[in-house]
Image (cartoon, rainbow, N blue to C red):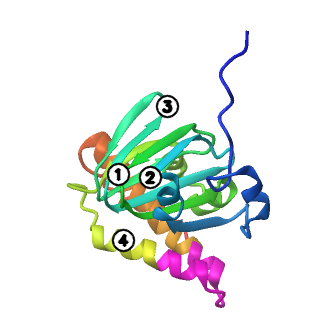
Amino acid sequence: MTGPAPVPQYYLYGRLEDDAAAEVELDFLHIEPIRKRSGPNDWTIRPHSHPHHLQVMYLVRGGGALDIEGRSIPIAPPCLMAIPAAAAHQIRFLPETDGWVTTAATSFVAQAAMGDARMIETARRAGVFPLAGTGLDPAHVEASFHALTREFVYAAPGRRPAIMAYFITLLVALMRAQAHETAGRPRDDRGQALAL
């Protein structure tokens, strides 16, 4: 008797040979519009995982459902989504859904977290996190994804530190959205020491 077929593993969703041929930095970060891979796949991202990469998505319009860890979670923009490394998942987007997906190496995420246990935990928590009621400004979150995309596509001096800075901003937004869902409001961290 044979078990279920293994879930495909990718860096970027698609065919395995695409990862080898792609001009990507596997130990760094990639960002692209959600529609780039979703549209050509009838807005359905079939079950798969990313063994060594965290995905953070921001949806500005559309919606759908994220199937992860035995749960089906509705997606209602504006929202952030987190898919931890190695988590098997599938996404059924509504047609014309728009936003961004970042795929970041776990080593890059660890650098961005700067040893902050809450940031590391943020990267390990799967789910869909609406922005409504969190105090997060959707326009600011969207502008951060735009800025990260701009830095990603240009080869300007300081590219990597700028990408790191914008990615940290996204992780903080995700942490705050997760904190709101958990406790109903973000924790006051003004007494915490700053790590620079």
| Residue 159: image location, x then y, percent | 63, 82
| Residue 6: image location, x then y, percent | 69, 30
Circle 3/circle 4 CB separation < 8 Å: no
Q: Earlier in the sequence, mark 4 or mark 1?
A: 1
Magenta stretch: give its range: 147-163
Please name the residue shown 20% across and 55% down the image. Answer: 133
Q: Which residue, given by chain and number where applicable, does mark 3 sit on?
A: 69
Q: CA distance from mark 1 to mark 2?
A: 6 Å
Q: Is residue 163 visible?
A: yes
- Mark drawn on residue 13: none
Q: CA distance from mark 1 to mark 3?
A: 21 Å
Quarter of the image for the C terminus: give it.
Answer: bottom right
Q: Which residue, given by chain and number where applicable, does mark 4 sit on?
A: 142
Mark 3 surroundings: few (<14), some (14-19) or many (≥20) residues within 10 A: few
Residue 156, magenta (yes or no): yes
Q: Is 41 rendered above or below residue 46? A: below
Q: Please identify the quarter of the rendering in which residue 80 is found.
A: bottom left
Q: Is residue 193 visible?
A: no
55 or 46, which lies in front?
46
Q: Which residue, given by chain and number where applicable, does mark 1 sit on?
A: 94
Mark 1 surroundings: few (<14), some (14-19) or many (≥20) residues within 10 A: some
